[in-house]
Image (tube, helix red, strand yellow):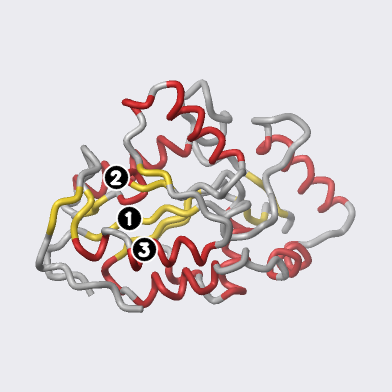
Amino acid sequence: MAAPGAPRFLLTFNLDETIVDETSDDSAREGFYNEYTQCVFQYLGEQGVRPQDLRANYEAIPLSPGTGELLQFVAKQGACFEVILISDANTFGMESVLCAAGHHGLFRHIFSNPLGPDPWGLLALQPFHAHSCARCPANMCQHKVLSDYLREQAHDGVPLSAFCGEVAFPRHHYPMHRLMQEAQEAEPSSFLARVVPWEISTEVRLHLHQGPMPRGIVSGLSGEETPDPRRPCLER
């Protein structure tokens, strides 16, 4: 457990190809997931598919290898971690997957596109928010979601060390890993996060346990480790 007043470490997860191996946000045109998926759900509803049918399909999606053990490890640390999920998927599917796996309660917040019953009982997808970022789909900018969250927590006096901004865990050979490599090569001085690629989630769990976190606080500015003798080691 964290010492009273000690910063908690913020862990930010994604869903697709991370918590699960599946990809739920593919669409015919890159960046148009929201519009495409709205049409898909409308079509399914017109064919008689109901929310409970879709829920059963989501619940059958297994977690990626090692993810169950990783989430159990994080949950065991109590107040050491604050865990959130940011994904350009949909709330209905994400909550169904996590509830079925028994890990929904671990996540303090789930940020995704709202998906719920419309007045006729069919599922309707809505954009998460509007933003001005030219690089992200119109329905969601994940950088803005995280920045807004950190700003709100700081305003409320919640001490959070944004571990996700100091150490990045991209899945090896997946798109995010390639993007990080390109950013490091193009402008090394601007990319401060330490990159720890992984094949299965077990590697992330071992890093959290054996890495610098138990011995210190990760600075949100420089990425340097500041020793903190008050912080106990994480439990296995």
Identify residue for label 3: 208
Q: Quadrant of the C terminus?
A: bottom left
User: Which of the two marks, 3 or 1, is nearer to us in this view?
Assistant: 3
Label 3 crowd (10 A; few <14 / some 14-19 / many >=20):
some
Circle 2/circle 1 CB separation < 8 Å? yes
Q: Mark 2 vs mark 3: which is more N-terminal?
A: 2
Rounded to the nearest angstrom, the CA distance separating label 2 from label 1 is 9 Å
Q: Mark 3 vs mark 1: which is more N-terminal?
A: 1
Rounded to the nearest angstrom, the CA distance separating label 3 from label 1 is 12 Å
User: Which of the two marks, 2 or 1, is nearer to us in this view?
Assistant: 1
Circle 2/circle 3 CB separation < 8 Å? no
Q: Position of residue 46 (x, y in %)?
A: 86, 50
> Which amino acid, by three-letter code, is at mark 3?
Leu
The answer to whether residue 163 is above or below residue 73 is: above
Circle 3/circle 1 CB separation < 8 Å? no
Identify residue for label 1: 10
Q: In the rendered view, does 99 fall on the left or right side of 23?
A: left
> Which amino acid, by three-letter code, is at mark 1?
Leu
